Amino acid sequence: MQQDRLWNDWHPVCKADELGDDPKQVHVLGERVVIFRNEKGVHAFKDLCIHRGAALSLGKVVDGKLVCAYHAWEYDEQGACTKIPALPCERPIPKKARAVVYHCEEYMGLIWVCLGDEPEQLINYPEGEADGYRTIICGPYEVNANAPRIIENFIDVAHLMFVHEGMLGDANHAEVVDYNVDFVDGHLTTSKIPVYQPNADGRSKGGYTDYVYQVLRPTVARFTKTTEGSDEEFTILTAVNQEDNEKSRVFMLLTRNYELDQPDEPYREFQDTIFYQDLDIVESQKPELLPLDLQAEMHLKSDALTIAYRRWLSELGIETGTLPLDEEKLERMKKKSAVK
Ligand code: FES
Ligand code: CO
């Protein structure tokens, strides 16, 4: 089922350096989650104290334990309650006094959370760890749209010449050559797609660049750009956290193997500009839920990757691209999304 599927996926919730000594509230697939850090690493619980339902994120971390702000129950990182101050000391702590624990990892400067019992493998981003490469984090960008719409925009080649004209594309070079999409090692990969770029990365070098796109997970995709005759590689990994049905938060890792000693700020500014060029389009798209029925909308050969993406979501049983929807809301969204 759709819920189960993304439920077991990893979702980026914040930058690792945003999580300091205090717990922090985040949202994943409509769930309220608290993340915190102690000497053993990063941890995620349902943001709810079992005693009286207060948000644990209002509390603090003391000696490695998450302490509720309301009556100071203390939880260790396994979710076990280890102290109830109101309880006379001869009485044992009830076994049921536990927090709901989720999976939590720190990777590539981001904190990732998985709510499900059978987590998928966390993505692997070799460039991010390789010598001679430099990675910066852009975002998080807030978007009022579903994660699949955002991923689909990121992997859409044919918009570069129009939405990002003068930067990542040129309307006079709008044709997209035929390319292949393969399913390799559990993800979608394209062959090289040449795109004429007037001003790639703001470095004012007009010419053709080859894009290779990969969709790693339903809400994580990447591309690498290379140019023939050059060793330069530029990669963007986009990971989307579907916070609730209508809101997403997008993180982007930008990795380059050139200009390593140059300031990062121009790269970040360039990416911010590009992202905000896409924002209005993505937020305007109807239906909000990516139509997985290939009879809906129109497809060209140049859309081969987004078609493959929709098929893959379909195969995974991710029917709507949004997650734990209550029935009523699902119905409402389906109605709203029905193609007129
Ligand atoms: Fe958390 Fe009472 S609600 S300790
Ligand atoms: Co774009």
Image: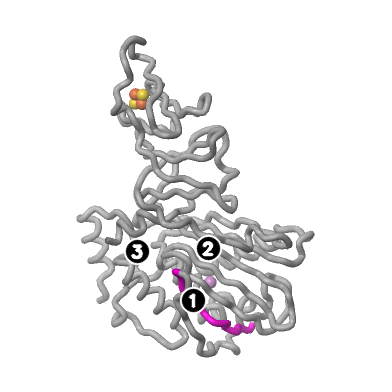
Q: Residues within 10 Å of mark 1 (few under 14, many from 20)?
A: some
Judge whether residue 65 can be spotted in this image: yes
Quadrant where the C terminus sits is bottom left
Q: Residues under labels 2 and 3: Cα distance? A: 16 Å
Instruction: Determine whether 43 is above or below 243 in the image.
Output: above
Query: Would residue 285 be found to the left or right of residue 205 on screen?
Result: left
Q: Residue at x 63, y 84 (%)?
A: 196
Q: Earlier in the sequence, mark 1 or mark 3?
A: 1
Q: Is mark 3 within 8 Å of ligand 2?
A: no
Tell me the SS state at disc 2. Answer: strand
What amino acid is at disc 1? Asp
Q: Which residue is mark 3?
A: 321
Q: Nearer the viewer, residue 26 or 89?
A: 89
Residue stretch in magenta: 186-196
Residue 303 picture location, percent across and down: 44, 82
Residue 191 magenta: yes
